[in-house]
Amino acid sequence: MSQKKNIFFGIVLISLLINACLSQQLRKDEFKSKISQKIQQLQKDLRGELYDKNTHFTPFPPRFDHQKGLYGSYIHGNIIDKDNSYLTHLIRTNFKCDDNNMFVSNFVLMALLDSYELGTIDLQLEEFEWTIDAILEFRDKNKEQGIPVYSFWSQKLINGTWGAAPSNLEHVAQLAATFPPWLKNWLDAIGFSYISHASDMSKVFRVPPDADDSSVNVALGQRLKQFQSLTKIEQKWNKMNFNTSAYYELLKQHAYRPFANLTGDLEKKYNNTDIIDPRSYLAFYDFFDEQYQIALKEQRKPVLSFFSTWILNYEEQVKDIVTIPAQTNNIDVSVNANAIFGLNNVLINDKNASDYFDQELQGMYLNVTNLIAYTIKSGRVIQRPDIVMLYYPSIFDFYWFAARNAHLLNSYDSEIRFEVMRQARDSLNQALRNQGTQQILSEIKYDKQGNAYWDEFLGDYADKVRGEDRNFASALALNALLDIWTISEKDLKTGKVIRKFIQNTPKNVTDAIDKGIQKIINYKPNFFETHDENVFFSGSLKNNASNQMFMPSNFNNFANGTSVNPHTTEFNWDFLKTLRLAVKGFIPKDQYEQMIQETWFQEQTPVDFPGYNVGEGFTFPYWSSPAITYSMSLLALSKHISIIN
Ligand SMILES: *[C@@H]1O[C@H](CO)[C@@H](O)[C@H](O)[C@H]1NC(C)=O
Ligand SMILES: *[C@@H]1O[C@H](CO)[C@@H](O)[C@H](O)[C@H]1NC(C)=O
Ligand SMILES: *[C@@H]1O[C@H](CO)[C@@H](O)[C@H](O)[C@H]1NC(C)=O
Ligand SMILES: *[C@@H]1O[C@H](CO)[C@@H](O)[C@H](O)[C@H]1NC(C)=O
Ligand SMILES: *[C@@H]1O[C@H](CO)[C@@H](O)[C@H](O)[C@H]1NC(C)=O
Ligand SMILES: *[C@@H]1O[C@H](CO)[C@@H](O)[C@H](O)[C@H]1NC(C)=O
Ligand SMILES: *[C@@H]1O[C@H](CO)[C@@H](O)[C@H](O)[C@H]1NC(C)=O
Ligand SMILES: *[C@@H]1O[C@H](CO)[C@@H](O)[C@H](O)[C@H]1NC(C)=O
Ligand SMILES: *[C@@H]1O[C@H](CO)[C@@H](O)[C@H](O)[C@H]1NC(C)=O
């Protein structure tokens, strides 16, 4: 009797278990098929943002220049009023200028490559090649053949020198010069005075090539080498970009070295290498002083060097053709994260890297990694996002830029051939898995269904939450968490790359990822709301708090050699176009903090970050790209599906 009962219960138990497993399997299959559907949808959305032919600007009917192969990227103004009204929402999201830049397309291609490697999508080789062709057009044509120095905008030849020429912006500026006064007044009234006064704008656009665009291009080329099916495309890329050593030589020549005058020897090699934008100095003075104190204690000379944004010195400018905005170079921690991403890809893929990864470059690499770690660990990234990252208002951009470096170093353990790579990996892991993760998790929000998401700032102000950048922020936060807590391994059987959580990944991280993925899958756009906008990057001046004139400086010269007294002189917008304003050399912390107490151009030093929305109408231009939102979502889903497989 009891045996029969046991058998009966045994059968019931087993069938219950089978049932549970089956329904779990079913749920998993259902979930995977939902992800696959979403991936297909995102690919379709992304395809819709690809320019499949060249078009030319016409004012009527309004049509912009499009360069075949590039993905859409749009310049908006962050215009917002005191009540965050629906009208400013409409202007913010709809009033935009199409922009042809290489940066956005680079990130889309990288996301496609990563997803392809994870086996979630196929590559459309013909279209992929269009984009490569388009990107190669952005190489700085002032440089000798093969040197991979890139410019954000493509160039045109002006009086024998190649200068950056954003055609749509130039057309709009030319057009604006012909506007009748009433239209100019109206633009002024709604906050777009920069358009109404745009007649000499084209000079402002003539930016030099930069370490950001150049380095993400280097990373892309190295990545291409890893795919046999892309050999032809890789060769095409390589033909334009083979001189890696010359590139890193240029980055060293244009680096920022706060202690150069104390060590003396570097100053002989690189002139004015210790001059920097006052904003960068205010952002990082604590780190500089910390390193100075350590060196004092260890009785050695302090040494620090970082990648400057612009690959150009003051002396190398060509008047009105290649010019540094506001005359002074800066360091941006996100640009630096991208610079070492290029370098990490080179170190992993180029067996000849030791030819140029010399002591000096190794030092920079390590210093940059430690600057990134400091920015996270100290909380500086939250206190002053506007000046630690001059061009990247999105904090999740930054976490992910840092995280993808960590993920690369964690995944290619066997390719670590330099001690500094090990140090870099450990330093990034430590910062990202502790404070970095806490900071990301502390920003998490939940909807009524319990799905997780993140918002940045677009449209969120005055107690109104429009969440315009929600999908972008969520996708980047997820990519950051996934890159911090997983490593990639090659499945020897299938050749596919798979992602695995590292041991002891905290449950609140895996929960956040699961719930965030649900949010992405379940998102349905509607007519009245948009969540696919973003601030992928922006201009550097946001409001008075990120105006370098109001910060301590000790170098205030005009080109003709005369200087101004930064305390007594009244603020004047023209100075941003003519004055070379900087911090030169190292200033010890106690002395610098004294300077913070003083007034600069008759204003207090802005020590606090007021937020990116200050309710003053127009504040700053930003670049939004739904293509980035789609590709980053695609990438997060691809990583996730690879883990649950
Ligand atoms: C190009 O050269 C011409 C003739 O010397 C000069 O008038 C013009 O201003 C120059 N253009 C720029 C942008 O420098
Ligand atoms: C790379 O550029 C440097 C500097 O211009 C040059 O000396 C060197 O020959 C170039 N290398 C190759 C392989 O072209
Ligand atoms: C180095 O610093 C000293 C003292 O601050 C200063 O007098 C000197 O001009 C500086 N040298 C250079 C090359 O900047
Ligand atoms: C630095 O400037 C000095 C003086 O102008 C000049 O003699 C020297 O060649 C310059 N060095 C470099 C590396 O540009
Ligand atoms: C590495 O250097 C050797 C010798 O200079 C050269 O022949 C080879 O093409 C280089 N390999 C790569 C991948 O650049
Ligand atoms: C910076 O790099 C130098 C070598 O150039 C090294 O001695 C120093 O320890 C590094 N400092 C940090 C904080 O990475
Ligand atoms: C995540 O979970 C760990 C362990 O339960 C806890 O110590 C930590 O505070 C949590 N972090 C956040 C940001 O919720
Ligand atoms: C920004 O600074 C300028 C120059 O001092 C001043 O005129 C303006 O009122 C300031 N704006 C705000 C919002 O404080
Ligand atoms: C130097 O240039 C500035 C700005 O253009 C100007 O205000 C100043 O008068 C000039 N000084 C001399 C001595 O020419």
Image: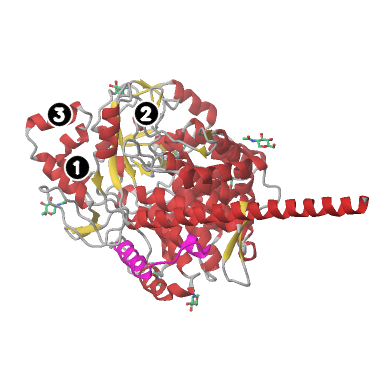
Circle 2 is placed at which residue position?
613
Q: Please say if the residues under marks 3 and 2 sit with CB atoms less than 8 Å apart.
A: no
Which color scheme is applied? secondary structure
Q: Earlier in the sequence, mark 3 or mark 2?
A: 3
> Residue 564's quadrant in the figure?
top left
Which of the two discs, 1 and 3, sits closer to the camera? Answer: 3
Q: Nearer the viewer, residue 454 or 36?
A: 36
> Which image quadrant shows ligand 8?
top left
For the residue marked with disc 1, what is the amino acid? Met
Q: Nearer the viewer, residue 352 or 107?
A: 107
Q: Magenta stretch?
A: 113-137
Q: Nearer the viewer, residue 142 or 230?
A: 230
Circle 1 is placed at which residue position?
201
- On the image, the x and y values in percent for residue 248 come to 45, 60
Mark 2 to mark 1 CA distance (whole Å): 25 Å
> Residue 569's quadrant in the figure?
top left
For the residue marked with disc 2, what is the amino acid? Asn
Q: Residue at x 23, y 62 (%)?
A: 53
Residue 562 visible in the shown view: no
Circle 3 is placed at which residue position?
186
Give the quadrant of the C terminus. Answer: bottom right
- On the image, the x and y values in percent for residue 92 come to 28, 35
Which of the two discs, 2 and 1, sits closer to the camera? Answer: 2
For the residue marked with disc 3, what is the amino acid? Trp
Q: Nearer the viewer, residue 528 or 239?
A: 528
Q: Is residue 69 magenta?
A: no
Mark 1 to mark 3 CA distance (whole Å): 19 Å
- On the image, the x and y values in percent for residue 116 come to 48, 64
